[in-house]
Image (cartoon, rainbow, N blue to C red):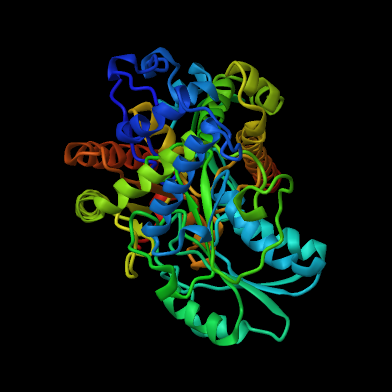
Amino acid sequence: MTEESSQDLPEKPPAPDSLPAGPVLFYNEVVIEHFMHPRNVGELENPDGEAVVGDPTCGDQMKVSIRVDNGRIVDIKFKSFGCPGAIATSSMVTELAKGKSALEALMITDDDVVLSLGGIPEHKKHCSLLGVQAVQQAIHDYLRKEKAEAERIHEKGISGS
Amino acid sequence: MRRVYLDHNATTPLDPRVFEAMRPYMTGVFGNASSPHFYGRLAKQALEESREIIASGISSKPEEIVFTSGGTEADNLALRGIAYQKGKRKGHVITSSIEHHAVLRTCVALEKEGFSATYLPVDSQGRVDPDEVKKAIRRDTVLMSVMFANNETGVIQPVAEIGRIAREYGIPFHCDAVQAIGKRVMEVEELKIDLLALSSHKIYGPQGIGALYVRDGIGLSPMITGGHHERGLRAGTENIAAVVGFARAVKIAIDEIDIYRTMVESLRNKLESGLIKALDGVAIHGAQGERLPHTSCIGFASVEAESILLHLDLKGIAASSGSACTTGDPEPSHVLTAMGVPPELAKGSIRISFGRENTEEEADYTVNALSDAVRHLRSISSQWTTAKPL
């Protein structure tokens, strides 16, 4: 049997700090940044449009509220119960929608969100759908209310004349 | 960055004393334990001495220990080895709904091959009821398999009672003790266990080595055929360095079991009481039952586990969860689901498992980091405003 001194221990594996932080292997820095500091978090009071999508018992959930002025989304807030992918994509979709006209914002796709984040892991791509759907539904809610309001005014106008 | 490792149920660092024991067998001693010459005899001697050490760790006979590539292979050998006896492809297997996937998915595979299986429920504390085991027995039951302690919650199962029932009905009883070895004293004869799966890397030994205890008189069909290694139950040249390391790890774990238990339990209690004090909406799963001293499975209302784990990882803390949102249809942990934990809370549950090298200061650091992460995520959460106290 060979006896060797403990000085001959094999080289240590790479020091932990020389590796990227664990999650960065899966999420890029932009995603991590949005996850740690999500934009537009909260709930608007008396929003012009709002939506809740997803079911917390079987998946992620996202709540979106929007303020619309002259057909443009001037403010948007979200709250999200979900994984890092869901939180980061929710944050990004609100950034993309803010300042756009309601019709422009309706055309945001999940690919737009993923691209703006510089990509997310393949198995997390579904997360971005939730945010896009929530924004679209909030806009539809706004459009429905607008339509009802327009009809109300229209009827009032007719009956008043 | 500061690093705190709190995932010892996944794997443990190699103990330097274990490495020292292994070293000669990775450098000088290289023989094949089946060779009759000097080199082979050196290897064979190390192999058999290691077998004796591991056997004495569970109060079995050395010849009842079969080395495998790890816990998963040991579970497979036990289940398939019994089920396939005499070339049969039918019969009934009893197991629990909270087993490790090594057992659970093997039972599912057996079902596809023609066997039938009963997956026993557990109570709200994650414990199998021995009466349910008894009720599940059929004329064609060929095997029972219930784990010693659960890997996610640490909840200890009534192994002695189940062993008694199994022996009474003459049904072989397999027990997956991968998480329990070194944390609980176990005497297989007294517990009436017929097959017991062990793993090295959960107790500061090397990865890639485990063992199956096979009680004298229990017939098994080998899964890997070839040479006459391991009493013909597991062919393949034995990995001597790993075997020696495994034995050293078992010896150290058993010699130091009391101090280990006291230490990790105090860290675990510090963590749990710290979190309960710092946060609302915290549930410790299985806390009413008897648990392994180092494992804590904690649910946080209105947040999702992977998000908590990412926050922790960014602070250098390594923990885990029983579920992962990877498919678009995240399945909550099968263990927590079996315990009746609501899916929203199961999705917000993480596992922290302490080890020898952790300190009180690390437990405090973790309480703070975890409380911050949960508070932050709740401030974003669409669920938290409506959450009710647990």
Image quarter where the C terminus of chain B lies is: bottom left
**Residue at the limit of the structure toward the front, as seen here:** B37
Q: Nearer the viewer, residue B342 or B230?
A: B230
Q: Quadrant for residue A94, please give it.
A: top right
- Classify B174 as above or below A20: below
Q: Is residue B7 visible?
A: yes
Q: Nearer the viewer, residue A125 or B244?
A: B244
Q: Residue at x 40, y 75 (%)?
A: B190
> Where residue B145 sits: x, y (%)?
57, 68
- Classify A158 as above or below B334: above
Left or right? Give the position of B236 relative to A26. right
Q: Quadrant for residue B117, please give it.
A: bottom right
> Where residue B203 sits: x, y (%)?
38, 45
> Where residue B165 sits: x, y (%)?
52, 84
> Where residue A129 sits: x, y (%)?
66, 35
How many badges with numbers are in the image?
0
Q: Residue at x 20, y 50 (%)?
A: B263
Q: Residue at x 49, y 21 (%)?
A: A24
- Classify B388 as above or below A146: below
Q: Is residue A103 visible?
A: no
